[in-house]
């Protein structure tokens, strides 16, 4: 049976990427070695790393003056890397949900990290607006897309202090202006590749000014100087990320996928709003195009619906325990046909139980 994978992460990747990656586990490009057993210093892998970093620059239109590296530790270590490299006196954080809150918590270990705006009052169901960004903070940190609650910044905060953004769950899903940011970071496993690698896009000369003695694995300086090869990089994750970026580029890049992601979101949210059995908990203007959260009121109908989607091969739409209901993650590789399957089930449920 065809599985429609709505997992929030690790998530669906293009089928052709799985095909090629599985081939390379047996024999990488005909060299007779598996990608898993090759030295990361071999010319073959150095080329993979170079291509992956260059594809990031190309696909995201990264301007001159930025470095691109793949590190480890997930976005969760990115919370610390941001603070270790940029927090000198105080930092400003926007709290739009659990990841954003965890990022602020890590910064607080090192200094003042003020929450300058939060949507906690309404269980993170909206994106705060009309807040003031302190002009004397070292940076403003925010999370572009809130994977758990299903909200997304449609317009990024503007400020004359450096912007640092956790883009784990919507990077490569829409066009962005990298030059607005001092640092962008993203765990690979939401829209780019398997868990393991974490992408950092860093403005040159923006870091290293805190006077802090930074553990080397958290220090952007040596990591960037060594071109992501300070220690053994997560070779397979970087390799698969490279294949995914090739796929994206070949098909038309971020502007191509952005349109499709909008179509998928319009299709599902349209049905959530139309269907008398479902409701969306998030403020309409802040709805995420990546992670759509929705609720079903009646418990009796719920068990019917759960049987229906399981029978249809839908996987991974159970909501996070802090929101309940359902969460449909529609990352780049999820085809619109999968969204149609879900929408048709929602219609059928209303026809039989509404
Ligand atoms: C998943 C996620 C994280 C945590 O990522 P790890 O790689 O597991 O550390 C952080 N931020 C956002 C926005 C996420 O979606």
Image (cartoon, grey):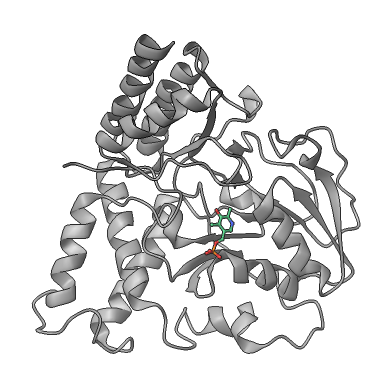
Q: Quadrant of residue 126?
A: top right
Q: Quadrant of residue 177?
A: top right
Q: Quadrant of residue 315?
A: top left
Check the picture and name the quadrant holding the C terminus.
Answer: top left
The location of residue 341, given as percent across then percent down, is 29, 27
The location of residue 60, given as percent across then percent down, is 46, 50
Q: Is residue 5 above or below residue 354?
A: below
Residue, x 85% and y 72% (percent of image)?
A: 88
Q: Is residue 297 left or right of residue 138?
A: left
The location of residue 338, given as percent across then percent down, is 29, 33
Residue, x 33% and y 50% (percent of image)?
A: 12
Check the picture and name the quadrant holding the N terminus.
Answer: top left
Q: Is residue 3 left or right of residue 164?
A: left
Q: Is residue 21 left or right of residue 238?
A: left
Residue, x 13% and y 76% (percent of image)?
A: 26
User: Which residue occupies the foreground of this view, 248 or 150?
Assistant: 150
Residue 297 can be seen, yes or no: yes
Q: Is residue 302 above or below residue 271?
A: below
Ligand 1: which quarter? Answer: bottom right
Residue 28 can be seen, yes or no: no
The location of residue 194, given as percent across then percent down, is 37, 64
Q: Is residue 190 above or below residue 285?
A: below
Residue, x 33% and y 23% (percent of image)?
A: 345
**Total numbered badges shown on the rendered structure:** 0
Q: Is residue 98 above or below residue 40?
A: above
Q: Is residue 47 left or right of residue 185?
A: left
């Amino acid at each position: 049976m065809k599985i429609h994978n709505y997992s929030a992460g690790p998530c669906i990747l293009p089928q052709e990427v799985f095909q090629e990656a599985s081939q390379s586990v047996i024999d990488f490009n005909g060299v007779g070695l598996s990608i898993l057993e090759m030295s990361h210093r071999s010319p073959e892998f150095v080329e993979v790393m170079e291509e992956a970093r260059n594809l990031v620059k190309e696909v995201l239109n990264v301007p001159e003056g930025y470095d691109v590296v793949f590190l480890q530790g997930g976005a969760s270590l990115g919370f610390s890397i941001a603070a270790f490299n940029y927090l000198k006196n105080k930092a400003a954080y926007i709290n739009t949900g659990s990841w954003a809150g965890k990022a602020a918590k890590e910064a607080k270990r090192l200094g003042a990290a003020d929450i300058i705006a939060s949507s906690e009052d309404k269980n993170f169901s909206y994106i705060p607006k009309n807040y003031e960004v302190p002009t004397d903070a070292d940076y403003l940190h925010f999370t572009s897309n809130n994977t758990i609650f299903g909200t997304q910044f449609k317009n990024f905060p503007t400020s004359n202090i450096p912007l640092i953004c956790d883009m784990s769950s919507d990077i490569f899903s829409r066009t962005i202006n990298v030059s607005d940011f001092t640092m962008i970071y993203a765990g690979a496993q939401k829209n780019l590749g398997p868990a393991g690698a974490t992408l950092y896009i860093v403005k040159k000369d923006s870091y290293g000014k805190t006077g802090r003695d930074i553990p080397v694995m958290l220090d952007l300086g040596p990591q960037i100087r060594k071109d992501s090869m300070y220690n053994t990089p997560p070779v397979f994750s970087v390799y698969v990320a490279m294949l995914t970026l090739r796929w994206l580029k070949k098909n038309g890049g971020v502007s191509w996928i952005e349109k499709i992601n909008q179509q998928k979101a319009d299709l599902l949210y349209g049905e959530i709003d139309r269907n008398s059995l479902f409701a969306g908990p998030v403020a309409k203007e802040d709805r995420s195009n990546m992670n759509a959260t929705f609720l079903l009121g009646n418990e009796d109908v719920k068990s019917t619906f759960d049987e229906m989607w399981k029978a249809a091969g839908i996987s991974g739409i159970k909501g996070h325990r802090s929101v309940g209901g359902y969460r449909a993650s529609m990352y780049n590789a999820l085809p619109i046909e999968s969204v149609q399957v879900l929408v048709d089930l929602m219609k059928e449920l209303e026809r039989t139980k509404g």
